[in-house]
Image (cartoon, rainbow, N blue to C red):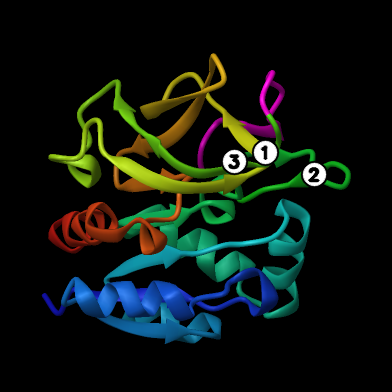
Amino acid sequence: MSNIIGVVNYGVAGNIHSICKALRKADANFLIVEEASQLESADKILLPGVGSFKDAIQELKNDRLLEGLISAIRVKPTLGICIGMQILSRIGFEFGETAGLGLIDAEVKPVICSGSVPHVGFNNIRLVKESPLLNGLDGEQFYFMHSYEVVNYTDIAALTTYCNHDFVSAISKGHIHGVQFHPEKSRDAGIELFKNFIEL
């Protein structure tokens, strides 16, 4: 198996430069996916994301990637990062109501807590179930930058506490994984996570 990671580049919502730099440090084989036909050449899917849920979905539609991406994620190991994890959900409520990819039974809602939002900076993750993506990373610090969170009660792999508020920092549903944090900005722990993804 060639073990090629397809990094989905979907316009302004993707922002993949730092992702690719971190993947090189993890010795990953990857290709940049900019059209649906390229998904066939990837053994795994990596879905980055910055910005808003609504913009991310619109970019995927504009780039004619949406349907092909859903089909690929259904059968290939996948990692969604930040917005990339959020859009795996059924629905998001950022700048209005937007249907997501519908691959995990979850909603994306604003972070409501006593602290300042967005939640920015390094914070620990706490594993709540076994996940090969997070092997050896329980208690590690990762870099977060988000104002919205995935509300999901069935596929939670890790939680993080911010100002007495617990939120989902990682999900795992079979071969589909997502992290709210940015491993590409999380130093050695982030590289280890990418190595775990390579080994899936």
User: Decide: marks 1, 2 in contact (CB < 8 A)?
Assistant: yes
Give the mark toward the camera: 3 or 1. 1
Res 2 quadrant in image:
bottom left
> Looking at the image, which residue is at 20% across and 28% down?
130
Q: Is residue 121 positioned above or below 190 on the image?
A: above
Residue behind mark 3:
89
Q: Is residue 105 magenta?
A: yes
> Looking at the image, which residue is at 59% across and 41% down?
89
Q: Is residue 117 left or right of residue 15?
A: right
Q: Which residues are magenta?
A: 103-115
Task: Work out which quarter of the rendered image holds the C terminus and state it.
Answer: bottom left
Q: Earlier in the sequence, mark 1 or mark 2?
A: 2
**How many neighbours does mark 1 have within 10 angstroms: few (below 14), some (14-19), or many (20 or more)?**
many
**Residue 101, percent across and down?**
61, 51
User: Decide: marks 3, 1 in contact (CB < 8 A)?
Assistant: no
Q: Is residue 98 left or right of residue 26?
A: right
